Amino acid sequence: MRIYARENMAQKLNSMRLLEQNKVLYEAIEYSDETRDAEEVAEMIGVPASMVYKTLVVEPVGGGKPCLAILASDRTLDLKKLATVMGVKKVGMAAHKDAEQLTGLKVGGISALALTHKNWTVFLDQPAINLEHILVSAGQRGTQLRVPTAAFIRLTRAKVADISSE
């Protein structure tokens, strides 16, 4: 594994700076920024879909603070399970436009690591704890970060919960 970002990367992102400030080793992986689907990203970079984690913006129905739900690209978010974990009656996925407006990041590039300064509540799907590393968006389309799962949980203050189905 490479320590920190590849030298030939066009720019260093805030997520990379955060990892470096916290002495977390990571690998940056670039791919076509036209690809937004996490399963396609996994195929494109040659890793199992169960290692590439997508970040979804979820809002409580009827109002309340939105959260980030992070799960493997080959799994489906279970809205009922997430609502239970959040302690609300019902939740819904934010529309792409709303997700971008809420996070300031483009869909396909939304990253909990890039949003730590905004104190988002982050829910990481339970299967992630069985993996030493996961791949998550770096905060812009076309760049994934391979990070240690434990460090990701610590830095994002993620709550690990069963929030998905196959």
Image (spheres, grey):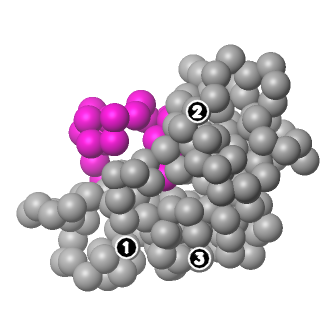
Image disc number at residue 32: none
Magenta segment includes 107: yes
Badge 1 is on which residue?
82
Badge 3 is on which residue?
126
Q: Earlier in the sequence, mark 3 or mark 2?
A: 2
First to last magenta residue range: 93-112
Q: Is residue 57 above or below residue 161?
A: above
Tell me the kind of residue under disc 2: Leu
Q: Is residue 80 at all visible to an observer of this figure?
A: no
Q: Earlier in the sequence, mark 3 or mark 1?
A: 1
Question: 29 and 40: which one is in front?
Answer: 29
Image disc number at residue 13: 2
- Relative placement, left or right, of 91 versus 39 is left
Point out residue 11 in the picture as x, y percentages from the top left corner: 64, 22
Label 3 residue SS = helix
* Quadrant of the rendering where the C terminus is positioned: bottom right
Tell me the kind of residue under disc 1: Leu
Camera-side mark, 3 or 2: 2
Camera-side mark, 2 or 1: 2
Label 2 residue SS = loop
Q: Is residue 3 above or below residue 132?
A: above
Tell me the kind of residue under disc 3: Gln
At a point 68% along the width and 75% down the height, the residue shown is: 129
Point out residue 61 in the picture as x, y percentages from the top left corner: 16, 63
Q: Earlier in the sequence, mark 2 or mark 1?
A: 2
At a point 74% along the width and 22% down the height, the residue shown is: 9
- Which quadrant holds residue 71? bottom right
Q: Is residue 45 above or below residue 82?
A: above
Few, some or many C-alpha atoms within 10 Å of disc 1 (few <14, some 14-19, many ≥20)? many
